[in-house]
Amino acid sequence: MSSVDGSSLVAALRERGAALGLAMVGVTTPEASDHVAHVGRWLAQGYHGGMAYLAREDAVARRGDLHRTMETVRSVVVAADEYAQGDPPGVPDDPSRGVIARYARGRDYHKTLKKKLVALARWLDGQVARGVGFRAYVDTGPILERELAQRAGLGWFGKNTMLIHPRRGSYFFLGVLLVDVELPADKPFKADHCGSCRACLDACPTGALLGRDERGAPVMDARRCISYLTIEHRGPIPEELRPLTGNRVFGCDICQEVCPYTHKFSRPSQEPDYSPRPAWEAEWDRDADDPDDDGPTEAVIPTTDGPALVALMRMSEDEWDAYTRGSAMRRAGYAGLRRNVAIALGNWLAGMDTPDPEAVGELVAALSDEDDVVAEAAAWALGRIKRPSP
Ligand code: B12
Ligand code: SF4
Ligand code: SF4
């Protein structure tokens, strides 16, 4: 393919991406990763905590070399899909309500973005006479998505470790298409727009962000990150971190909320799938391709405000199943969410002179939860009730 053909094809690819609702589409080469050694050092420090899948030897090798994932890969298409949205009333300031990170308030992005990537690949396939072989990834493969995105010109690595675009901020998902056709690559994003700013480092409640290392890579100790603790971590949350998680019951956006680029340039997402999920109240269109998605569910918790902690704690497993169907929130599991909510209830009670009886009642009931981690979190939460002064 001549470079002229290639350039116009990439221009048309971007147009097609925009028509599918993708905010950005960039192209890079499948050359070996520059960052994989950094990832190795990060893993050696144990900063990944319990995310053992990141440290598997074969997965690390595959992160360094995309050809191990797809032998015939010739180019990499990276897409960004925006999910920004405002907070519901009461979030995050009302400590009786739980904060769910923006990315998980609507339909599971893995499904939505993957469909867009596959549609983009099929379109590309129709443009190239010999056809195009591809593999599509959203989070699921051993792929350093942010490094590829930086190389494809989509943004820089902020000190909060997010990939940030100077005119779009960082509330976007990344998806990657490995294709067996050579496309002209975009210029990598070289500039670091953080400068002397350190707003994210100062705002992180748990001190998870450690700043840049001597090579310029931003470093996070994921074991301290609320996103890790509330979503990925199994078992008890370290006690010293519990008061610092506040009312965040699933994920955390603080280091993005304070970032001047994200604050200034994020626009509400145009993707209906990423809007707060109406299923909590009424209709939720069924995803016919998803065997787990059996259609509209009953109202569990209304979404006009952020979800009340007491209501979240009261949910039965069946209600949780309905509440999280088709949502990224399923990842924490029923017990994981209850553990997080118990801790948030404890943080709420700690600020009250007269403890809320419903919160106390739910926590007392949870003392006999069949999951020991939930029961222990409930006991800890009840221990935070202020003792009346003598
Ligand atoms: C594991 C993981 C997590 C972990 C660890 C996060 C982390 N910072 O590493 C936890 C659970 C904490 C997490 C949290 C979140 N995640 Co996450 N996560 C991932 C996942 C699956 C792998 C990331 C990984 O390999 N981390 C290990 C680090 C060491 O590697 P890295 O991400 O490539 O980044 C490092 C290097 O590239 C290097 N580097 C950067 N510049 C330079 C320069 C030089 C010279 C060198 C040598 C190296 C170097 O430093 C970076 C940081 O250490 C990716 C998907 C994917 N496959 O990439 C999503 C992903 C990164 N997550 C995403 C999201 C949305 C989130 C959350 C916002 C969710 C939430 N609201 O709770 C938070 C954000 C927290 C934060 N500040 O990062 C998005 C990010 C999109 C974006 N715009 O950046 C991704 C890309 C998923 C997706 N497909 O959209 N996540
Ligand atoms: S997501 Fe929250 S806890 Fe994690 S690094 Fe950012 S501010 Fe800190
Ligand atoms: S808050 Fe400041 S230091 Fe942190 S990522 Fe944004 S610009 Fe960079």
Image (spheres, rainbow, N blue to C red):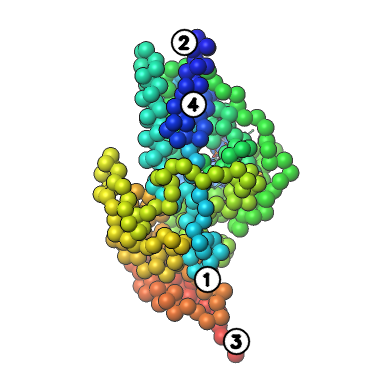
Name the residue that disc number 1 marks. Answer: 348
N-terminal of the pair, mark 2 or mark 1, is 2
Please state which of the two labelled residues, at mark 2 or mark 1, is closer to the viewer: 2
Q: Percent x, y for residue 152?
A: 55, 27
Q: Is residue 4 above or below residue 170?
A: above
- Disc 1 residue type (three-letter): Trp
Q: Residue at x 60, y 24 (%)?
A: 187
- Disc 3 residue type (three-letter): Ser
* SS type, badge 4: helix
* SS type, badge 1: helix
N-terminal of the pair, mark 4 or mark 2, is 2
Looking at this view, name the residue that lies furthest to the bottom.
390
Please state which of the two labelled residues, at mark 3 or mark 1, is closer to the viewer: 1
Q: Is mark 1 within 8 Å of ligand 2?
A: no
Res. 1 mark: 2
Label 2 Cα neighbours within 10 Å, binned few <14 / some 14-19 / many ≥20: few
Query: Is residue 6 in view from this perspective?
Result: yes
Name the residue that disc number 3 marks. Answer: 389
Please state which of the two labelled residues, at mark 1 or mark 4, is closer to the viewer: 4
Q: Are marks 4 and 2 in contact (CB under 8 Å)?
A: no
Q: In front here: 1 or 370?
A: 1
Q: Are marks 3 and 4 in contact (CB under 8 Å)?
A: no
- Disc 4 residue type (three-letter): Arg
Name the residue that disc number 4 marks. Answer: 14
Mark 3 and mark 4: Cα distance apart in space: 65 Å
Q: Residue at x 28, y 39 (%)?
A: 289
N-terminal of the pair, mark 3 or mark 2, is 2
Q: Residue at x 55, y 37 (%)?
A: 39
Query: Is residue 42 in view from this perspective?
Result: no
Q: Is residue 7 above or below residue 17?
A: above
